[in-house]
Amino acid sequence: MMKPTLIEITKLRILSRIGLYDWEQRILQPLDIDLRLTIAENTFLDYADVAKKVTAFLQSETFDTLERVAETLVTLLKTSYAVSAVTIRVAKPFAIPGAQTVAVVLEQ
């Protein structure tokens, strides 16, 4: 029986336009992305290409919520690569006073 391979990319810092308010969408804000990608055993996944694709996508779009970022990234990854499962954590550092970060985790 073949076992799946798990690939993790953690703390990928990307500047993106995100927020519910107009002023937030006019500035670049950091997002920290953690990815867990499951692929079939003996399958190759170019994780440098994954990081480049995620970075380029987040730098080219504007988002209103972390949930929307996570949902669109899962779709992007599942349609671009031979992954059987994706877990993604999208964190926005210092999004609220008193908290180091606010994050959303999505598994599919």
Image (tube, rainbow, N blue to C red):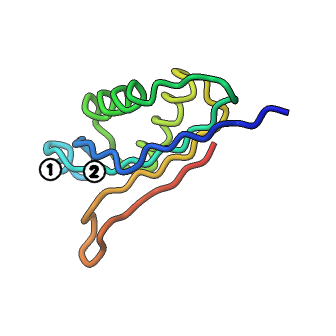
Q: Secondary structure at mark 1?
A: helix
Q: Amino acid at mark 1?
A: Trp
x, y percentage for residue 95?
Answer: 27, 63
**The N terminus appears in which quarter of the rendering?**
top right
User: Which residue is at the front of the view, 77 or 61?
Assistant: 77
Say if 7 sits above or below 66 in the image. above
- Picture residue at 24% right of the left edge, 41% below the top: 16
x, y percentage for residue 33?
Answer: 38, 47
- Picture residue at 46% right of the left edge, 35% below the top: 72
Q: Which mark is residue 106?
A: none
Q: Quadrant of residue 38?
A: top right
x, y percentage for residue 27?
Answer: 14, 45
| Whether label 1 touches label 2, CB < 8 Å | yes
**Where is mark 1, residue-wise?**
23
- Picture residue at 53% right of the left edge, 25% below the top: 45
Left or right: 34 in relation to 42: left
- Picture residue at 14% right of the left edge, 50% below the top: 23
| Identity of the residue furthest to the bottom in this view | 98
x, y percentage for residue 68?
Answer: 44, 43
**The C terminus appears in which quarter of the rendering?**
top right
Q: Secondary structure at mark 2?
A: loop
Question: Which class describes the residues within 10 Å of circle 1: few (<14), some (14-19), or many (20+)?
Answer: few
- Give the CA distance from mark 1 to mark 2: 8 Å
Question: Which class describes the residues within 10 Å of circle 2: few (<14), some (14-19), or many (20+)?
Answer: some
**Where is mark 2, residue-wise?**
19
Q: Amino acid at mark 2?
A: Gly
User: Which residue is at the front of the view, 91 or 95?
Assistant: 91
Say if 58 sits above or below 65 in the image. above
The number of numbered discs placed on residues in the rendered structure image is 2
Left or right: 22 in relation to 40: left
